Amino acid sequence: MEKSGTQLIAEITEAVKKCGEIMKNADRSEANIEQKAGHANFVTAYDKLIQKTIQGLLYEILPEAVFVGEEEDVHAQIEKGYSFIVDPIDGTTNFIKDLKQSAISVALLKDGKQYIGVCYNPYLDEVFTAEKGCGAFLNGQPIHVSNSPLEQAIVGFGTSPYNPERWDKTFEMVKDYMAKALDVRRMGSAVIDLCNVACGRYEIFFEMQLSPWDYAAASLVVKEAGGIVTMLDGETPLTFDKPCSVFARNMD
Ligand code: IPD
Ligand code: CA
Ligand code: CA
């Protein structure tokens, strides 16, 4: 018998919590930091270890699903059947700096469309979950985006650190929001930023370029919490087979 969404969320939650222990108990002297392509783009032994661990656990949960992970070039076709899209550590620079603002993100897609999202910040023991059409939850409690207007908004943003050609436009937008909103924030984890919109801590989050593993799970959490997520033009839906801009907000 096919597993229900509720069952899958429970099992994926257990898996991300196991991996959260690895993140929390990491020995930074063993992190073996390597530079990837682009400005300040790092991978550590823990990104790789968590990805390998979660891949094994997710295989036990849903063996028929293909797996896409940020590290080690693990890619697959996602348009048919089930696919997991995983970021083992979102906020690797935060992790390296021990800022305690990093998350594990697992999205499950069905025929290329978002079905389930699970995002876990082990430092706060916060798990954000959503199933398409069934609402969004923080540690099992229903969550909703805030109803504050722009003048009372906290605007989270990402700098697209690996894409310097995006920086001018990013900071132009930040300056503009600074004048119109309450204040701006740069947390260092797009997954946590999006979850902050979902539960009403932020009203807006934007980043000019992100990859599917950064938003495949958390953007579903925002939408199921009553928010709107598109590309920066305000209308184009996000793509899950290639990078795009992300603009999440509580209202239009
Ligand atoms: C990064 C974080 C960061 C965002 C970058 C992402 P990573 O993910 O989400 O906040 O600004 O664009 O790539 O590399 O730490 O998994
Ligand atoms: Ca990421
Ligand atoms: Ca990552």
Image (cartoon, helix red, strand yellow):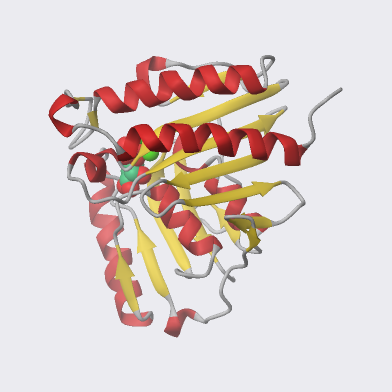
| x, y percent for residue 24 | 32, 40
Q: Can residue 235 be spotted in the picture?
A: no
At 45% across and 16% down in the image, what residue appears? 74
- Judged left or right of residue 126, residue 35 is left
Front in this rendered view, residue 168 or 210: 210
Q: Quadrant of residue 162?
A: top left
At 31% across and 65% down in the image, what residue appears? 185
Q: Can residue 97 be spotted in the picture?
A: yes
- Judged left or right of residue 109, residue 242 is left
| x, y percent for residue 198 | 55, 61
Front in this rendered view, residue 165 or 205: 205
Tell me the quadrant of the picture where the C terminus can be found. bottom right
Q: In this figure, what is the number of numbered marks?
A: 0
Q: Residue furthest right?
A: 1
Q: Residue furthest bottom?
A: 151
- Answer above or below: position of 37 versus 240: above
